[in-house]
Amino acid sequence: MAYETFYSDLVCIGAGLAGERVAVEAAAAGFKTILLSLVPPRRSHSCAAEGGMQAALGNCAMGEGDSPDVHFADTVKGSDWGCDQECARIFADTAPVAVREAGHWGMPWNRVEAGKALCFKGGVCFEVDEKPEKQGLITARAFGGTAKWRTCYTSDGTGHTLLYTLDNKVTELGITVHDRVEAVSLIHDGETCQGLVARCLKTGALRVYLAKAVLIATGGYGKLYSETTNTVINEGGGQIVALDTGLVPFGNPEAVQFHPTGVVPTNILVTEGCRGDGGTLLDVNQERFMHIYEPEKAELASRDVVSRWMMHHIREGHGVPSPYGPHLWLDIRHLGEKHITTRLREVYDTCRHFLGVDPITQLIPVRPCHHYSMGGVRINKDGYAYGLKGLFSAGESACWDMHGFNRLGGNSLAETIVAGRHIGRQLVEYLKGAEATLRTDLARQAVAKDEARIKRIIAGSDGKESVYEVRNAMQQVMMEGVGIFRNGTDLQKAVDDLQVIYARSKKVGLKSSGIGANPELAMAIKISGMLRLALCVAYGALQRTESRGAHAREDYPARNDRDWLTRTLAYWRDENGDLPQLEYEPATKVFHLPPGDRGYGKCEIICREEMSE
Amino acid sequence: MASIDTAIYVKPPSRASAYLDWLQMLTGAGLIAFMWSHMVLVASVNLGVNVMNTIAHFFEATYMAQVGGPLIGATMLFHFILAARKIPFTTGEQGSIWRHAKMLHHQDTWMWVVQAVTAMIILIMGSVHLWTVLTDLPITAAKSAARIQGGFWMLFYLILLPMVELHVGIGFYRIGVKWGFVKADGRKKFKRSENILTAIMIFIGLVTIIRFATLAI
Amino acid sequence: MSRQLKFNIFRYNPQDPASVPHADTFLLEETPSLTLFIALNKLREEQDPSLMFDFACRMAICGSCGMVINGRPGLACRTLTSDLPAEITLMPLPVFKLVGDLSVDTGTWFRATNSKIESWIHTDQEFDPGAAEERMENALAESIFELERCIECGCCVASCGTANMREDFVGAFALNRMARFIMDPRDKRKDADYFEVVGTDQGIFGCMGLLACEDVCPRSIPLQDQLGLLRRKMGFIALKSIFKRKG
């Protein structure tokens, strides 16, 4: 058993925005850092973020009077009070600095152009007068669930541009990048994380990384669902290796976001910026409907609310029939050719290439589909994972938890570099005090265990289940039972079905040889881990008998602050079991903003008992 | 910074590539201008034997042919050497560019292959032509006609003519797009005009050859 | 009436001593709006699970799925089979090292090249977290974004005659990237610094002007114009230095 070993101060699993931002902080402080990534870092899912990132700069006319306080309040309301308010506070305060810093590194943010300009809201035209003294400062656009125009952007390629800017910084600092590497398991002694076993996706060989600190920044777990805007690599690799330790909890697994405007049938995202810039949603009669359900915010309520109303409207029979099931229309025609081809360029390209639709003259078919994972590796406000020293997480892979049960548009991109910056600094402090006692014996044991498992999969020693059939079965169950609207019966069935599929996943055997960078083997190695995640999501949702944010229970429609102002912590302690152990902690230790009405998304609230102030 | 090498090569800044690229372009442009003027001179026979003889005489009387001729030859050779920096000579490189062109189905790439191939042919045939003409001054319509009517030279010029015109036409197009004189939105039109121009030049050339072939000596 | 599609796919697994480069043929029933992304995944899941190829975003913005489709480098995810004949030949991108079948290692190549051309903002200015941002005209930000839209898919490099012949040529992507930095006032590099990086035969003067890059770029980046601009700029920087030396 020969394997290569790499030593480092910090190893980041995942080199999207969050991973790279942390790496930049560590490398700039002089620590040896290795970035691992499934794909070349610039191909990470961060590049798919379109519309922008929220930061209370207050430069544009419609953002006047904005401040981190307002941003904080929007974020907490958006989370339906499920977030950790300490984190949300750190986040809102740091976001403007992070935006400017990215600008300093070369990010071409769109800027304020002084003078009068025509804008749209809900299909109605109005005039905005940008002040001359703000000319050339970073501007912002409207997004859902925000009191001000706060979303900073470069056209609708904000994630792409930000990722390239940050990767340029990584290149400048000469940070080591190993791309096409997949984490298989964490190496730890029950207390401290020592590193990880990984598989090279170029050669198929296992290798070991030993480090003082390990960061998980692998993004979300969208591929548990079949209809998702997520890339094919968002399979929850980071959450799997953390959960598999049996020590680190998976926070709020059931908090899963559905985006209102996935394109039918390909589930490609069209940015919320479309609605932010004045686009409207239309039904089969090509009439607006959101203003009926949400008189105040209309199309620009938070994503969970808009998605639910859209599905509701379709259920009421107002959907547009199509071979791919009923959908609704997104209308951006009135924004005009210039706006669409400059500020909504990706949308323009996507519609033409994948749908054959010209959004300047035609309607875009949309339907809510899976989009974001609010849950993840549970960390404290400084990024330390619960349960294992030396393990950190940041970005979508983490449950930091500033999003609670619903993330606002523009807050994910912001979280990557804001949390990355903050957690990176805390990690540097940790590294300064950490002495390495790297255990090569643990590494050897871990590799031996993983290698034995891989050999059994290749040989089909445990069975000959097809990995793709198992995955498809899981995705179908998740779509049907753990979707936008949930109820006890369906969730119970989903859990039962997933348990059966989980058993099948342990009997997966390869059809191909498994030699080299074999893709079937890569999927087979993680499939049972993906099912453990799916079970956490479904079981967590089943147990949470209330509706909060994106978690909407038809049998428990009220938000229950009395019993459920909590965060789910799912542990997988029993390697041979087929259900997680759920524990709960208070959603937040401090209340800057006591639970109340969000101002959109009609919902009954069961109040908590009076707290002594 | 994390990646400072303890030892690096210190390379003196070199502008050679830039100068050579300028020279390649300028010699190319000069030769294009010459070839088109040359065509006008030779084709003038179609207007009448005396027209051509008069023009030819003018160039000789002013010694432009005697001095200019060898100069053109030298420029041609110089241009070849400059451009040869980009032409594949090893079999490995030739193999890759040939495979590449066959794979790509891309007109501009094929045009470049044509340029490279015609360059070789022109280098040889052009030199022969230059030598023949310049060692037998003065240039007269009658002498040219006699050569063409010999038969071998007819074939020689029927090959050389399209080679030169293709090379010159494509070269003209290439300079335009490569140096940004022609922008992306004008490229298609420019290419079409260049193709038409080349076709016209070849046509005039053919007419001229026929004229020589049928000229009563 | 749906067509029967015939795929000829390049196969080679360098890690398998028994494997030799060859082409495999697969048949697939065409369905409405079928893309190569869907088709290749079907082939992998239903016919040959060892088939190697790369996809990530499946919406033409990550640049993973560059491959040679019937002779032309392009993004597989946004290629509709309805735009192709019934016989489809797929090859890995040339120039880059092969991982296996249709998968090539673009990551290492691009990282090395980005490092070589120093693709980052060079400035002495420290970031001041307390200060307002430096101002910039929106039009300039939009022009920078226009060039920054490159997704490093490798199609321009794979279709480049020079890059196919000479390993050290940086390719249109890098020249476009330099044009982006030259345009950006935040980058304090001087003309001579830029010239050192791209004023060579590995840079702009290695470009032979075949413009396949312009014609295959899936992002429609104005490569032809940027290359022309860069050639003139670098050319004039060199000319100026003659006069400077004399003076």
Image: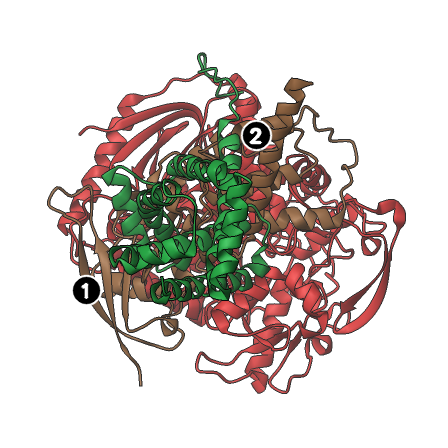
Q: Which of marks 2 and 1 is in front?
A: 2
Q: Residue A573 lies in what quarter of the image?
A: top left
Name the residue furthest left.
C18
Q: Which of marks 2 and 1 is nearer the N terminus?
A: 1
User: Horizontal and vertical percent for residue A159?
Assistant: 58, 49
Q: At numbered mark 2, what does the secondary structure look like: helix, strand or loop? A: helix
User: Few, some or many C-alpha atoms within 10 Å of disc 2 (few <14, some 14-19, many ≥20)?
Assistant: many
- Three-letter code, disc 1: Thr
Disc 1 sits on a residue from what chain? C
Relative to A243, say whether C11 is above or below. Answer: below
Q: The green chain is which one?
A: B
Q: Which chain is brown?
A: C
A218 left or right of B105? right
User: Horizontal and vertical percent for residue B112?
Assistant: 39, 51
- Three-letter code, disc 2: Phe
Q: Across the whole image, how many numbered discs are drawn on residues? A: 2
Closer to us: A475 or B139: B139
Please give the residue where the numbered disc 1 appears in the rendered image: C25
User: Few, some or many C-alpha atoms within 10 Å of disc 1 (few <14, some 14-19, many ≥20)?
Assistant: few
Q: Which mark is residue C195?
A: 2
Q: At numbered mark 1, what does the secondary structure look like: helix, strand or loop? A: strand
User: Horizontal and vertical percent for residue C12?
Assistant: 20, 49
Q: In this orientation, does residue A535 appear?
A: no
Residue at image location 29% in from the left, 60% down from the top: B149
Q: In the rendering, what colour is chain A? A: red
Q: Do labels 2 and 1 share a chain?
A: yes
Closer to us: A565 or C41: C41
